[in-house]
Amino acid sequence: MSIEATVYMSMKRYLKVAGWHLIGGQPPSGTDSLPVIEIKLNFGSQRGSRDSMKPDLLAVQRDELLVLELKPRYSRTDHIKLQSLLDSPGRIEALWEALRERNIRDENGDVLFTRKSKMKLIVGLGHTELKPPLSEVWQFIKSDESFLAIPPATREH
Amino acid sequence: MGNNWEIWSDSLIEADWFKNLDVRMDSAVVYTIGQRNSNPVHIENLIAYDRPDIILCDSGKPILVVEKTAEVPTGHNVGQRVARLVRSAEYGLTTLYFLPFEARKHGKYSSMCNINPRLLRAMLKMGEIHNCSVLPVNWPCDEYGELISDGSEDTVMSKLIRDALDSYEATGIVVLDDCHETSLRLEIKEREASFPPYRELPNSAEVLATRHFLKDKQLTDEARDHLQLRPESLVYTMDMSPEKSGRQDPYTGMQFIYDYGWLRTGPRPIDRDLNLILNIPRVDLKTWTQKNPEDYESKSCNWYLTADAIVLSDGIIHLTDWPLHHVD
């Protein structure tokens, strides 16, 4: 079985234990119970999945939305992908729109994303490689069954 | 009774999901389905057409196959995954297909999608013909058409797996209650009543007089005489371009839906009263055989699993035996 799948499953368990509510994701292979959230570069475009981003995991805790990309090792491509999400108001709006469209609910059955809801977006990379803190991007370093959470060097956004 | 459960899967995520459906799976060992010719023979047999998501074995003996998808089978999704269901049925295995019967498609033209009843009809017939259960299991959605993902979506699957394992432990074979086939019949009836055109074949699959269809086709006298032994043929026409002809999905799955849903009278491809002809008028024989060789080591073999002929722009491939076919 792939290390990527192991990272994915371990991260799901870690987030649940840490009190996060999983709301979406796309496993590296196969079908999971979570809905796949597609962030289109150009929302409303009929160009299929081209130019879209499907985060590996999305989770909510209180007023924070965590978007995660997972790989066995640090991935510069994923890092750039997350940074480009943070840097693009259009993409961020497409993310909120995709989440609103899904009528995603919390554990109490209340709709999480509405026009009025205010949630802070944070992004992270999950992998197994110990790296120095990254600007604006959290890191979750897998070690056995748990993860070491490394906050961004600067979290201002 | 000591069981040595083995879960064979492509995906750790799906294997983990399956393990959690019944407590007896706690002891199951998970194996990765490898590339062709790298697995035990009982697994190779079941992946000869395509790779199912889960194969449950007891001490090396397959007893159950499960397929899982979050995609609603409409449009091009209908035919995908059908070949692997057929293969499992050929081996007489109880086969469960966990999928949404309806769900919302997202995007600019967001709308509810409903399962194509032709798939359900074919699955019912597969089970009847191969004397096993081939059952769709609904992945439910909420009132907005979003798939349920709080764990409750697995309730019916868990019960089916429990019943399957109970019957296996009691009798040595997996037998599910006939009520599931009855429910499937009712589901088909209701969906066909809601969408009457789906009672019939689509426009791309017509029943034609064999002699008339073959009149201007280039084929040997022997092939013509053989095909004309059946006065009528179901001709499934695929409008694919030469450039995009090197593919199987969804066409090869659709051929099985039409075959089982409308033609098959028995477990072998020869068991039908009409020919099944795959008509690909924009592709020539040379291009076709380059892009889709009769190679039983690759998925391109799916074109050669059940049809009587593949008709191309300048010739035909006449099929009289189907070497991979298995009668349990």
Image (cartoon, grey):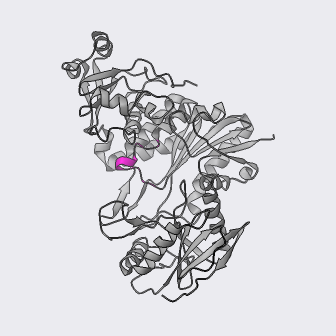
Taking the view exactly as shown, the residue that stands out farthest to the bottom is A156
Residue at 20% from the left image edge and 20% from the top image edge: B212
Frontmost residue, B229 versus B131:
B229
Q: Is the magenta stretch mostly helix, strand or loop?
A: loop
Q: Position of residue A20 (x, y in %)?
A: 61, 77
Q: In this view, does A134 lie above or below B121?
A: below
Magenta stretch holds residue B76: yes
Question: Tag count in the figure?
Answer: 0
Asked whether, in this view, residue A79 is left or right of residue B254, the answer is right
Residue range in magenta is B71-81
Q: Where is residue B267 in the image (x, y as percent from the top left)?
A: 49, 25
Magenta stretch holds residue A116: no
Can residue B62 be seen from the camera position used here? yes
Frontmost residue, A138 versus B21:
A138
Q: In this view, does B85 lie above or below A115?
A: above
Q: In this view, does A97 lie above or below A3?
A: below
Rendering quarter of residue A12: bottom right
Frontmost residue, A126 versus B114:
A126
Q: Where is residue B20 in the image (x, y as percent from the top left)?
A: 67, 56
Q: Where is residue A74 in the image (x, y as percent from the top left)?
A: 59, 68
Asked whether, in this view, residue B131 is left or right of residue A97, the answer is right
Asked whether, in this view, residue B158 is left or right of residue B169, the answer is left
Rendering quarter of residue A42: bottom left
Can residue B174 be seen from the camera position used here? no
Rendering quarter of residue B207: top left
Residue at 39% from the left image edge and 48% from the top image edge: B77
Q: Is residue A58 above or below residue B140?
A: below
